[in-house]
Structures are given as structure tokens and as C-alpha cells.
Amino acid sequence: MLATQYDPAFAHLAPAIAVDEVSHHYGTGEARKQVLFDNRLAVRPGEIVIMTGQSGSGKTTLLTLVGTLRRVQEGKLTVLDCPLHQASDRDLVQLRRRIGFIFQAHNLFSSLTALENVRMALELQPDRGSRRAQNRRCREMLEAVGLGDRVHAKPSSLSGGQKQRIAVARGLVHQPEVLLADEPTAALDEESGRQVVSLFQRLAREHRVAIVIVTHDNRILDVADRIVKMDFGRITRDARVGEAARIGEMLSSCEVFRGVTVRTLTELAEAMHAELFPAGTRIIRQGEPGDRFYVVRNGQLTVRREGEANPLARLGPDDFFGEAALLTGQPRNAHVEADTDVVLFSLDKAAFHRAMAERATIDEEVRSTLFNS
Ligand SMILES: Nc1ncnc2c1ncn2[C@@H]1O[C@H](COP(=O)(O)OP(=O)(O)OP(=O)(O)O)[C@@H](O)[C@H]1O
Ligand SMILES: [Mg+2]
């Protein structure tokens, strides 16, 4: 089952990459072998998705399909509004200029210098500017990957990691809107790997580049907004890590969850769904039965009792509400209203109780903190 959590940071944007029921075969006749099965994946502008999975599971195949290096055989695949499954060769040529590729085999030209290799990526661009401007841009890119002092070196005189960093610079120099990277840090030591992924993060945050990184490198998992796992040609897991970790942290600072294990908190966080409520919405009505627990992601709310002039409390980011009715089974004891547009993460009663049941003693503890304090 795929988690289809809604992330308010990206949700209003149309996906830059939309993979829909995509399957793929290699070979024909006897040798025909299916390697991708009904995959779905959406990557929004500014999002970093890390794809993991064992060797041969189909990661590179999927990446080359998205990158238009292979033709879509089955299913729909749309990249930057171009439907690849029905695109002409001309459409694909135009689209490729907007994509950055960093692939395992770096394919550098041995007779060209580092700078000239990077400049190759600009040659395909329609508005590439003067040679001087191109050189300046290429030099900046090489500096950004830590090769500012090797711009005139030929690949044969560079280490594997240095060559890999030229490939990174070449993949980014034309300011792509989609970046596809296959093991970009495999040949790099800790420091240069970090330098490369920090650069990716900056591109995602500042330029809203949609990024897919295939990697086995556990050292870089923390840059992902989502981690997707591929097993035997199928995406079997699609988890919004950063967000779940953030909600988990928020939950762990809630008094009601004191003593609950990190594992349970993570499960709770993963089961939570975000929703946007416009200003003025009454989210909880006093007297109604309680069926959800809420954490505020952003916006401001007011808690008030029926007939009382002064509000009971004001709530903002990281505050939570709605737990009392879930635990006691009593009706809601106040109204909760959105003063601004708010994004809330919420958990339904069943999920809340399932997580709690696992830790019955803690449930007791929660009740006592709530009602004896
Ligand atoms: N050009 C090809 N012709 C035939 N079969 C191929 C071809 N490329 C890949 N395959 C097969 O398709 C399957 C998926 O390969 P793919 O390269 O996509 O895996 P991967 O997940 O990228 O693996 P790795 O982590 O080792 O790079 C494998 O069984 C592989 O043998
Ligand atoms: Mg591969």
C-alpha cells in the first residue's frame, strides 16, 4: 500500500513528473522479460525523491524512461507537461533541454577539459549566451562541486570522484527543471558527497527543481522529502520522510504522548493526513462526538466555549488539539475555529487507538497525565 500523504508545501503544484501505470519489458520472444510493473509516482517541483532498491529492481530503467532515453511502452508518463507516451521526436528534443542527467557511467569526453565537458550541456540550449558567459557559468558550476582549481584538467588526469563531480556540474549547468541522478555520490567521499547533495537541495529549494536520486548511499537519505523503494520492478514504498519525521518530533513534544516510544510516534506520524481549512472554518464543534486528533502545521486557531466571550486558548504551529474526546469518549468540550487559513495534520480515532492499544500501559499513563494534572 502506498502512502499518499498530502504535503501542503508541494500539493498545490502540478507534478513535474507523473508516472502512471508504467510497465516495461526488455527483449522479445523467448527473451522477453518484464522489468517494471504498473508503477505510479508523482514528483512535484521543488521535491527531492530518493529511490532505493536492490540491484536489478528497475531503478535505472524507470529513470531512463522519465529522462526520455527510452520510449514508454505501457502506461502514461508526463514530464513538465509533456506526455512522453505520445510525444513526437521533436517534443522530446525540446524537453531534454529542460532535464538534467547525472548517470552512473559519466561519459566524459577524454579529449576535452573539465570546463569543455561541462560546456557540452550548454551547446544544446537555444539561448545559451556568449562563449564568455558560458565559460563563466561552467566555471561557477565546477566551483560549486569543488573543482574550481581543475577546470582545465582532462578526465584522464582526474580521480573517479573528480570525474563524477564533472558529470554533476554538466548535469546542472543548463539550469534544468527536472534533475535525474543515478548514484551521483557513489564515487565520492563523505565531504564531496555532502557538497553535491547540498547543491541539489539548494536547486530544489531556490529554483524548485524536481529531483529524483537513485542511490544506495545511506549518508544522503536525509536530503530526501520522500524515499521510494523499488522491489522487483514495483514501487513498494513511498514515504514522506521529512514530513513524518517532523510530525513525529512535534508529537514527541506533546505532553499527551509523554513516554510513548519513538516507534509508535513514527507510526502515528505516518498515519496522519494533512488538510487545508480556509479561514473561518469551524473544525471542531462543541457537543459533537470526537473522531479525530489534530496537530497544527501552519495558521492560527481559536478555542472557545459556547456562550463565553473570551477565548479559552489560541493555537498556532506545532500545537495540537482534539485528544481529550478521543481518550474519554466524551463529546467535544469547546469549538475550535480557524482564524487564518490553516493546514492541519489529523489522525482518525481508529488509528489513534490502534497505536495506543499497542502500548496499553502508556494509554493509562496518558489518561493520568491528562486528567490528574
Ligand atoms: N538493456 C537491457 N536489456 C535487457 N535487460 C536489461 C537492460 N537493462 C536492464 N536490464 C534488466 O532489467 C532489470 C532492471 O535493471 P535496472 O538497470 O533498471 O536495475 P537497477 O535497479 O538500476 O539496478 P542497479 O542497482 O544494479 O543499478 C534487470 O533485471 C536487468 O538485468
Ligand atoms: Mg541502476
Image (cartoon, rainbow, N blue to C red):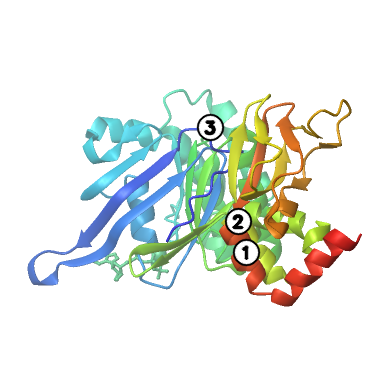
Give the mark, 3 or 1, whose residue is nearer the N terminus: 3
Q: Indicate the quadrant of ligand 2 in the picture.
A: bottom left
In the displayed structure, 292 sits above or below 89; it is below
Q: CA distance from mark 2 to mark 1?
A: 6 Å
Residue 169 vs residue 233: left or right?
A: right
Q: CA distance from mark 3 to mark 2?
A: 28 Å
**Numbered mark located on residue 349 in the image:** 2
**Numbered mark located on residue 262 in the image:** none
- Residue furthest to the left in view is 29
Give the mark, 3 or 2, whose residue is nearer the N terminus: 3
Residue nearer the viewer, 151 or 19: 19
In the displayed structure, 202 sits above or below 262; it is above
Q: Tell me the kind of residue under disc 1.
A: His
Residue at 46% x, 39% y: name it.
Answer: 121
Q: Tell me the kind of residue under disc 2.
A: Lys
Badge 2: residue crowd in 10 Å (few <14, some 14–19, many ≥20) = some
**Numbered mark located on residue 12 in the image:** 3
Q: Is mark 3 within 8 Å of ligand 1?
A: no
Residue under label 1: 353
Count of residue discs: 3
Callout 3: SS: loop
Residue at 43% x, 52% y: name it.
Answer: 109
Confirm whether residue 193 shows in the render. Answer: yes
Callout 2: SS: helix
Residue 191 vs residue 48: left or right?
A: right
Badge 3: residue crowd in 10 Å (few <14, some 14–19, many ≥20) = few
- Residue furthest to the right in view is 373
